[in-house]
Image (cartoon, rainbow, N blue to C red):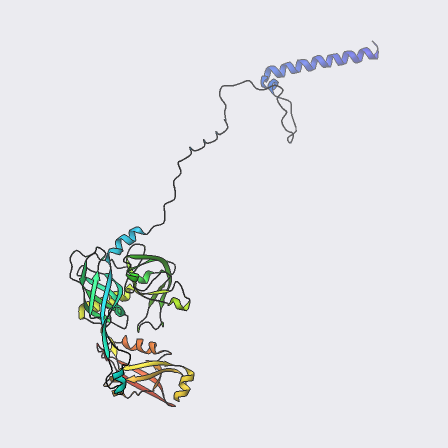
């Protein structure tokens, strides 16, 4: 046998042996026959030659998209309203009509000129004015401003329900510009009292009153500032400033919060003739509460008094008066008075009250009226070019001072 024949015989024998070995392996491990061809680790799997058979169940079905919500009918937004607060508070706001008897001198007549003015002519007339007030209890007590009823001979009160009656003065406190009246009617509406010490700048407030005789007028604004003082409106000042419109006739009316609670008594506006808009002031209800309790209990508020009338003097006026500098000058002393008996004099320049520097007459008065009778107050200042120090006993302020 030549070389070619031997090679073919060897190859054939090898193939037969290989097939026999494969048959033995498959018979022993039949699962090896079902494995796919090996592939590199990073190679992507080969696409299936034929699609898989259809199945009635899917192992991991895709998540279904949520159904779109059904359209809702249009609902307009709820309007901003303070009607509940007004309904709760407004019935307790009253109109106050006062009558004052005014005596005035008329223009000189021929007879008056003939006798050199020895027989001047006078006439009397009744002056009416309007204001507002707030009923604060079922006994008919009404809080208003002192300046609303000052010098009034007759006071008439008109309620929101149409009833009208006369009012009497229980007491007044000029230092805070507050007064308390009383009416004798049954089934009176009253206004709940809030807390002015909880007010914040930006809080919504409503002013209710009777400006120009237009009863139950409501205006709206915010708290612009708190604890305003040194405005020259009263001796003791701690005002709420608001941009809620307060017009003439609103004095003594209510400043309320959005719950319908009283938080202040409207007392003043800045004159529009000065070109100012939206600046009004109210006495905080915490001060009103204290004054009201004192007046109802005692008919007055007990305040300190030493009998001085201080005024503010500028530098130019001080030079004309021969004073060392401007400041607070005692323009007048009552006779008799604790100040006069202690040695104070008209023209004294006051620099300190109880060790606290004062720059305005209102500062001096505020520190004195806040003290109780029986205490003392020490004033320091200049008399001419000499300094002085005087301790004055505090008395109760007379009602007519």
Residue 60 as seen in the image, left or right of residue 109? right
Return the residue nearer the eye: 55 or 138.
138
Quadrant of residue 384 in the image? bottom left
Where is residue 279 drawn, in percent x and y? 38, 64
Query: At 23% from the left edge and 64% from the top edge, which residue is drawn?
Result: 97
- Do we see residue 31 in this rendering? yes
Return the residue nearer the eye: 240 or 196.
240
Where is residue 225 drawn, in percent x and y? 38, 64
Query: At 30% from the left edge and 51% from the top edge, which residue is drawn?
Result: 83
Q: Residue furthest right?
A: 2
Return the residue nearer the eye: 119 or 401.
119
Quadrant of residue 101 in the image? bottom left
In what quadrant of the picture does the C terminus appear? bottom left
On screen, 233 above or below 27? below
In what quadrant of the picture does the N terminus appear? top right
Query: At 31% from the left edge and 77% from the top edge, which residue is drawn?
Result: 365
How many marks are shown on the rendered structure? 0
On screen, 165 above or below 106? above
On screen, 4 above or below 143? above
Where is residue 248 drawn, in percent x and y? 32, 64
Residue 211 as seen in the image, left or right of residue 317? left
Residue 35 as seen in the image, left or right of residue 367? right
Query: At 26% from the left edge and 56% from the top edge, which residue is drawn?
Result: 90
């Amino acid at each position: 046998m030549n070389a070619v024949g031997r090679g073919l015989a060897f190859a054939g024998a090898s193939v037969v042996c290989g097939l026999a070995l494969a048959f033995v392996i498959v018979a022993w491990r039949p699962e090896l026959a079902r494995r796919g061809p090996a592939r590199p680790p990073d190679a992507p799997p080969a696409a299936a030659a034929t699609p898989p058979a259809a199945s009635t169940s899917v192992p991991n079905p895709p998540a279904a998209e949520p159904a779109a919500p059904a359209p809702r009918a249009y609902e307009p937004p709820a309007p901003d309203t303070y009607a509940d607060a007004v309904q709760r508070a407004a019935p307790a706001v009253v109109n106050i009509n006062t009558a004052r008897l005014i005596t005035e001198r008329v223009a000189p007549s021929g007879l008056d000129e003939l006798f050199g003015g020895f027989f001047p002519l006078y006439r009397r007339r009744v002056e009416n004015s309007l204001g507002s007030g707030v009923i604060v209890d079922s006994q008919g007590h009404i809080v208003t401003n002192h300046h609303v009823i000052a010098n009034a001979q007759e006071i008439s009160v008109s309620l929101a329900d149409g009833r009208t009656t006369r009012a009497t003065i229980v007491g007044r406190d000029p230092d805070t510009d507050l007064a308390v009246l009383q009416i004798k009617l049954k089934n009176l509406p009253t206004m709940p009292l809030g807390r002015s010490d909880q007010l914040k700048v930006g809080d919504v407030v409503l002013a209710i009153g009777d400006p120009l005789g237009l009863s139950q007028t409501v205006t709206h604004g915010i708290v612009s500032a708190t604890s305003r003082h040194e405005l020259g409106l009263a001796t003791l000042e701690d005002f709420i400033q608001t941009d809620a419109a307060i017009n003439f006739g609103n004095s003594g009316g209510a400043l309320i919060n959005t719950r319908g609670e009283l938080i202040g008594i409207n007392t003043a506006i800045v004159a529009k003739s000065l070109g100012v808009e939206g600046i009004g002031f109210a006495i905080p209800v915490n001060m009103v509460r204290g004054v009201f309790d004192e007046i109802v209990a005692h008919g007055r508020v007990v305040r300190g008094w030493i009998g001085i009338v201080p005024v503010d003097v500028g530098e130019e006026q001080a030079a004309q008066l021969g004073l060392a500098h401007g400041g607070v000058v005692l323009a007048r002393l009552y006779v008799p008075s604790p100040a006069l008996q202690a040695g104070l004099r008209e023209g004294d320049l006051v620099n300190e009250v109880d060790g606290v520097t004062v720059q305005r007459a209102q500062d001096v008065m505020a520190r004195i009226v806040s003290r109780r009778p029986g205490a003392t107050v020490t004033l320091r200042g200049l008399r001419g070019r000499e300094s002085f120090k005087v301790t004055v006993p505090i008395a109760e302020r007379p009602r007519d001072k």
